[in-house]
Image (cartoon, rainbow, N blue to C red):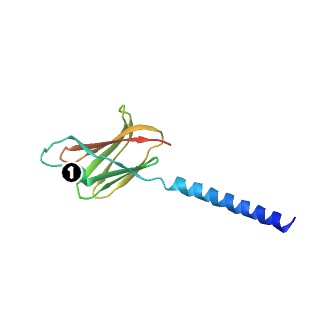
Amino acid sequence: MTKTFKTVLMLMLFVSSAAMGFAHGAEGTKQDESIMILQKKAGHPCTNKGESIHATLNGHSLVVSFSENLGQVVVEVETISGGNVQGLSTITPNGMQFYIPFEGDYMVTFTLPNGDEYYGEFTVTD
């Protein structure tokens, strides 16, 4: 092989490797989607703790966190049509993570100890 031919082959290998790395990096930079939390039912109309509940979606992972102590909170994830996906209870201000295996439209509901309910709707896509 000539020196020029080897140089061209090495250059092609380098460019294709860089392009593959860029494509992989672009996939990994998908931004988290913040989910708006709304009040569904208020046991105490003067309180609005929805601003203390934070939910983000990254692919199939739903991450929930609480910025203040709300007590024991029940968190339920279900399909928009009402099919239960997962439900957990946690002491706040801890957080939790849910894995949603299938594409579709979902709702996450938060029930506080005083009866207040908050919810957020989101869509899982591949």
Q: Is residue 4 above or below residue 98?
A: below
Left or right of 103 on screen, residue 42:
left
- Which of the 4 quarters of the picture holds residue 92? bottom left
| Point 15% across, 49% down: residue | 47
Percent position of residue 45, x then y:
13, 44
- Which of the 4 quarters of the picture holds residue 23? bottom right
Percent position of residue 101, x then y:
48, 42
- Asked which secondary structure carries label 1, the reply is loop
Residue at the right extreme, as displayed: 1
Residue at the bottom extreme, as displayed: 3
Residue at the top extreme, as displayed: 81
Within 10 Å of disc 1 (Cα), the crowding (few <14, some 14-19, many 20+) is: some
| Point 31% across, 43% down: residue | 120
| Point 61% across, 59% down: residue | 21
Percent position of residue 80, x then y:
36, 34
Q: Nearer the viewer, residue 47 or 20?
A: 20
- Which of the 4 quarters of the picture holds residue 100? top left
Residue wearing tag 1: 49
Q: Nearer the viewer, residue 77 or 71?
A: 77
Amino acid beneath label 1: Lys
Left or right of 91 on screen, residue 84:
right
Percent position of residue 18, x then y:
64, 61
Q: Is residue 82 above or below residue 45?
A: above
